[in-house]
Image (tube, helix red, strand yellow):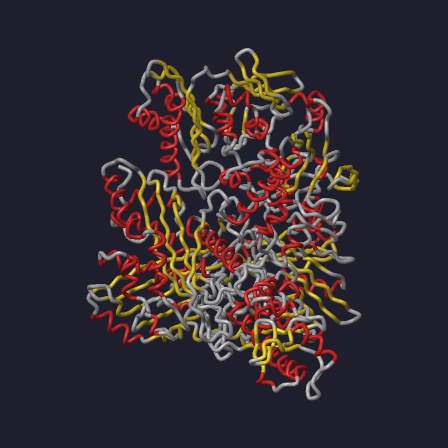
Amino acid sequence: MSDAIESREDREAKLKGIGCSRRRAEDARFIQGKGNYVDDLKLPGMLFGDFVRSPYAHARIKKIDASAALALPGVKAVLTAADLKPLNLHYMPTLAGDVQAVLADEKVLYQNQEVAFVVAEDRYAAADAVELIEVEYEELPVLVDPFVAMDENAPVLREDIREKTVGAHGERRHHNHVFTWEIGDKPGTDDVFAKAPVTIRELISYHRVHPSPLETCACVASMDKIRGELTIWGTFQAPHVIRTVASILSTIPEHKVRVIAPDIGGGFGNKVGAYPGYICAVVASIVLGVPVKWVEDRMENLSTTSFARDYHMTCELAATEDGKLLGLRAHVLADHGAFDACADPTKYPAGFFNICTGSYDIPVAHLAVDGVYTNKAPGGVAYRCSFRVTEAAYMIERAMDILAQKLGMDPADLRLKNFIQPEQFPYNSALGWEYDSGNYPAAMAKAMEAVGYRALRDEQKKRLEAFKRGETRELMGIGVAFFTEIVGAGPTKNCDILGIGMFDSAEIRIHPTGAVIARMGTKSQGQGHETTYAQIIASELGLDADLITIEEGDTNTAPYGLGTYGSRSTPVAGAATAVAARKIRAKAQMIAAHLLEVADNDLEWDVDRFRVKGLPEKFKTMKEIAWAAYNKPPPNLEPGLEATSYYDPPNMTYPFGAYLCVMDIDVDTGAAKVRRFYALDDCGTRINPMIIEGQVHGGLTEGFGIAMGQEIAYDEMGNVKGATFMDFFIPTAVETPVWETDWTVTPSPHHPIGAKGVGESPNVGSVPCFSNAVNDAFAPFGIGHIQMPHDAWRVWKAAERAGLHG
Amino acid sequence: MGNRTISLTVNGKAVSATVEDRTLLIHLLRDQMNLTGPHIGCDTSHCGACTVDLDGRSVKACTVFAVQADGGSVLTIEGMAAPDGTLHALQQAFREHHGLQCGFCTPGMITRAYRLLQENPDPTEEEVRMGISGNLCRCTGYQNIVKAILSAAETLRTDVQLEAAE
Amino acid sequence: MIPGSYDYHRPASLAEAVAMLSDLGEDARVLAGGHSLIPMMKLRLAQPTALVDLARLPELKGIAADGGELVIGAGVTQHELIASEELARRCPILREAAAMIADPQVRYCGTVGGNVANGDPGNDLPALMQCLDATYVAVGRGGERRLKARDFYQGAYATALEPGEILSQVRIPEPPAGHGWAYEKLKRKVGDYATAAAAVVLVRSGGAITSAAVALTNLADTPVFAQAAGDALVGTDGGEAAAANAAAIARTLMNPASDGRGPADYRASVGAVMVRRAIARALTRAA
């Protein structure tokens, strides 16, 4: 009976459940180089695919001559659109209701667009063959400026949908128009602006970037003609969706399609949608009857797989003289490149951009988004941002600083004055979201105290005076950002991907000896699900997390789920996990009652056991109950101990945070040094503090890269710039600041364990924080909003505009 | 432009392989020798995910021809643990300090850290950051990687002291 | 990502290497560290038919101080250069500049010879060598030639090296004890080529500069030895006014490209800033 002596705390600690910084279960294989990534896979007879790509941004294809390539030893096939047309696969549906060319049909629309697919015995032969394929192009006028995309004489890009005056999201008023999406109260908002004492209006652009995980996109497609089964291994953040799409496109019935996402080397949204490489590998495998592998290289990844952002946001705020917000009015020009390949829930072509009222109590608002086509890579996806939330947060947080400057108010004080207050939750925003919970003033106060905010402002004043006296050539900037984001898509009533509701799932099975296997419909790409889902189960069921195996990614075994992106795993599949565990616990209670010969409600749950109320020495542990489930179930119950939950969340969740940073800018070089960065995140219940901290570090680093120089740019001929790591800014350990992390905990009232998700918060909050810091440094000089990215030369140009170069 | 046979030592084992002159070392290791620990993350020799230890130097295996390693000795992540399976102090520290998330940069990072600590057994934080500046990570923001390397450095120094005392 | 085919050759001596290179014809190249050439081959921007591997040639190794000259084998890697305590004592600007080249892995492979001989305007050592008035020793079928670094660079990837010649040594007149030195490099991130960089070596006596050399990296399609800028410092105290003047003169010699690092006017402007800061730092080290 030594168990009885063990305290509650000790028993809880042994479980390594919720709240424990449990070391990761998945690490063992990674630290020994035994991860299982797609390009590690070798199958007998496997061939390699590689693309011929267009050097031009807009051109007609006159001729493709693959004869020299086909004559090369080791080359098995060359596919072009002509080969895919009879299968109706030369276009594939995108997640945004558009179509995307799999292989360019008669014209190319962006530089590096796929034109032909070579299949050869090995990578080297495939690369040689690509060089030998001759394509004749006739160049067409190029459109890269979204602001003129809908001009009367703008070049026609999408001849394939030329006649379609109605797109997936409504009327198309121009051949380069994708959609218009509007929400809010236009007359009410216009009225407020007409009467407002103070208004600001600014064009705030969020430049085009790319999620750039360290592992590029890849797949191995293997058609087994004898069994009639197609297996696809791939870098898929949403394996089940890929299976359903693959089944529909290939017409192979879904039970004969198996999709396996093995270990994935980072996703960040890059690996949600389908790419031509996947389709071509599948077709090649079906045609040739052997496995076909496709692995893109980095240039292909950065220049053709889905970009992120590229939003041009005109934001207006209306306020009283003393800084109370009266209204928000915004228009967004969204550059979608050549095809709208956005990965958004169907009804939201601009994602959840309408979170742009942010953390503030804004009584009325109106938003309109216009999407346009240009000769750039298709997209965009949510680069660690939950469907345009990074864009929305950037817009409102920049706008707040701009308003603060106009009012002569401190940016933190302006925010404090306008926060949604704790008693206002659940809060219905003017643009249609119901925020679940939040305590913004407490988080902001904690952050400001932690960095000594007021003292920093004093220091900044002194340093500015020193600058003006010529004693220093550095300007100090303080960045303030308070974001509320919306994650955990989402309720099936308004969130679906290609018509499939955005629930998620968990299936948990307890073995006779009390070990567990559980599978979820999500797919980790580094977030540590093998560790954290086990912690939820450990706490719910009183079983040691180290005895719980978590599996994801194999559609033959995992219950249907919509995958991992938009920080949805914890809010949705995490909830499913808790709910499934509670179903098991309910059955376990009945088994325990049977074993202890008491009634069900004579028992109470105590960490890892059911004990008789008032008789704590009479108990059965979950381990004992598991054994009994397999050999002594109550007469009215089946043997076994397992449950599945498909969880349809009642709402999204709304993590929030207060980020503060200090920057010192050398005005003569434009180089900015981050002196300090403090990030306070509230993600509700914290499952694994160590993993949360790691996620925050990573997201802040991505945000740092984005804000300070990362960019996918195009010149006027549509040539893509920044498509290698020479120019695409990924910070090394030297540039990356030291991050200070902190937290508050405001649980989500509607989530079974109160958790909200955190993976994307740091990317959402950090970019405006850095950008506000740079702008703050130059605020005394009145040069207006400085656009991102804040690479050294652009900061230097700002200093020049400010007349600081003497 | 045909094939040639080369001989080298990989993770302590003498091996020979048939390669084209243009075969990159990373492809020899991954595709022919099934050492899929080192990874390919870029095309321009920036990311360091392919880092191995060649003749006592950290090198990017994507920027070395296999034939250049003829007669040489290569250490990859697969050779870091002891023969009896005991993990190297770096491997243990990476797990203990959460120095990895997706794991893709990890083999190259640990292999580079190994050589870094051979060069400098007692680095400062700044020296660690400079020392891994040829290895990119997208997940961790480097902070826990640096912690792990500093921790492993201390463990290794202590081991050396204990051994010396014996 | 995959290079084209070529034939690999591994000579046992420098003489054999020279003969091979000559016999293999004009589409053969030397392979030293390979970290400029192999990336170009992987992009198929360089497609040599043959490579002659210099990496193990003993004649190209070694660092020696020889009668007032520092002699560095062309096959010495950046790592070996940085590790040399002898060089760090006698000519510390070499270590400072080499430590800013690329990253640790590249420095293990990249050679001094490769960095000075391939004519890439982004390389750091060429300007340094011009600043130090180094001489390159080139060996070809016809024997040995000595070429001044200050006369070596003709354009982007175009140097005075003849086809079939291999750089074997870099010879640097040892700067006097107590000289001032600095390599000031502005870059977007560690490992990047310079947005702008300036090398300054000077000697001061009794408060006045008695000799000064200024050279610039990546501010034209070759390194720039800014003779007039160095000359303008002589006789001055090198203070703010003199440094600004020298920088302004150096600026007239700059013709940077506009690229991801910034537009030409920015790069020239920060180039001048690098000159000023290099002068200031060099003075803190000067006797």
| Image position of C223 (left or right of B91) | left
Q: Is residue A285 visible?
A: yes
Residue A576 percent across, percent down from the top left: 56, 74
> Going 56% across and 30% down the picture, which residue do you hit?
C115
| Image position of B13 (left or right of A714) | right
Residue A742 percent across, percent down from the top left: 43, 57
> Going 47% across and 17% down the picture, which residue do you hit?
C175
Count of labels shown?
0
Residue A99 percent across, percent down from the top left: 55, 68
Residue A504 percent across, percent down from the top left: 57, 73
**In the figure, residue A280 lies in which quadrant?**
bottom right
Q: Nearer the viewer, residue A67 or A647?
A: A647
Report the residue that reaches farthest toward the bottom. Answer: A636
Q: Is residue A380 visible?
A: no
Residue A776 vertical placement versus C70 (above, below): below
- For the C terminus of chain A, the quadrant is top left
Residue A804 vertical placement versus A618 (above, below): above
Q: Nearer the viewer, residue A524 or A299?
A: A524
Q: Nearer the viewer, residue A243 or A424?
A: A424
- For the N terminus of chain A, the quadrant is bottom right
| Image position of A49 (left or right of A343) | right
Q: Nearer the viewer, residue C9 or C170?
A: C170
**In the figure, residue A101 lies in which quadrant?**
bottom right
| Image position of A249 (left or right of C155) | right
